[in-house]
Image (spheres, rainbow, N blue to C red):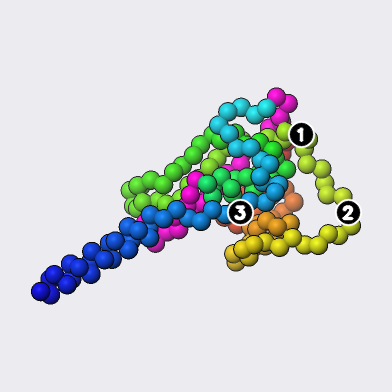
Amino acid sequence: MKAFETTKVAARLLLVCVVGCDAEPALRPVSPQAERVRVETFEPPAGARLAGPIRASDGEGCGIGGTRGSLANATAALKEAAARRGLGFVKLTHVTKPYSGRDCYHVDYVLEGLGYYVDSPPTPAVAAAPSPPAECSPPCSPGYACSAGVCAAQCTPACSAEQVCRADRVCVPAATP
């Protein structure tokens, strides 16, 4: 009888994991600026100017101990990163989906592409009348700060003027148009 009870408990745990572990992560909202960014697999529109490589991901880690990502959230992160750089188009060059590696099952999505300016390169911000700060909803995670309604990574120490802070909070060289 004891073996039967143990099997029943194990079956319940397996069912909870199958139902809970397979759920798609919640879709993250995108800023109005990011909604205007096009992410495609084909060439950019005529007149677009190359800005350089761009990369974003969603999820991290391995197996049940990792945070499962989604293609939709990785695309949203890519759009946000492009919008922060003033880009209007991203040509996807590589998509890495969750996969089984030598050591574990990787649960993240990684999108890589080339960013393009479609109208004109971004111009430096001109001092304007202060507007009320846009709040991020939901609030930003630790290590991120709300900037114009978008959670942006905050590198510590801060990046130099020639660098940008990546979503994984690492300073990398800024792409030049």
Q: Earlier in the sequence, mark 3 or mark 1?
A: 3
Q: Quadrant of the C terminus?
A: top right
Q: Quadrant of residue 19?
A: bottom left
* Residue where numbered disc 3 is placed: 29
Mark 2 Cα-neighbour bin, 10 Å: few <14, some 14–19, many ≥20: few
Q: Tell me the CA gap for discs 3 and 1.
A: 25 Å
Horizontal relation, residue 176 to residue 15: left or right = right
Q: Residue 135's quadrant in the figure?
A: bottom right
Q: Residue at x 88, y 54 (%)?
A: 127
Looking at the image, which residue sits at the far top? 46
> Which residue has dot 2 on it?
127
User: Of the residues shown, which amino acid type is indicated by label 1?
Assistant: Asp
Residue at screen point 51% across, 51% down: 58
Q: Say whether marks 2 and 1 touch (CB < 8 Å).
A: no
Which is more toward the observer, 168 or 2? Answer: 2
Q: Position of residue 174 (x, y in %)?
A: 68, 45
Mark 2: amino acid: Ala
Residue 108 in view here: yes
Q: CA distance from mark 2 to mark 1?
A: 22 Å
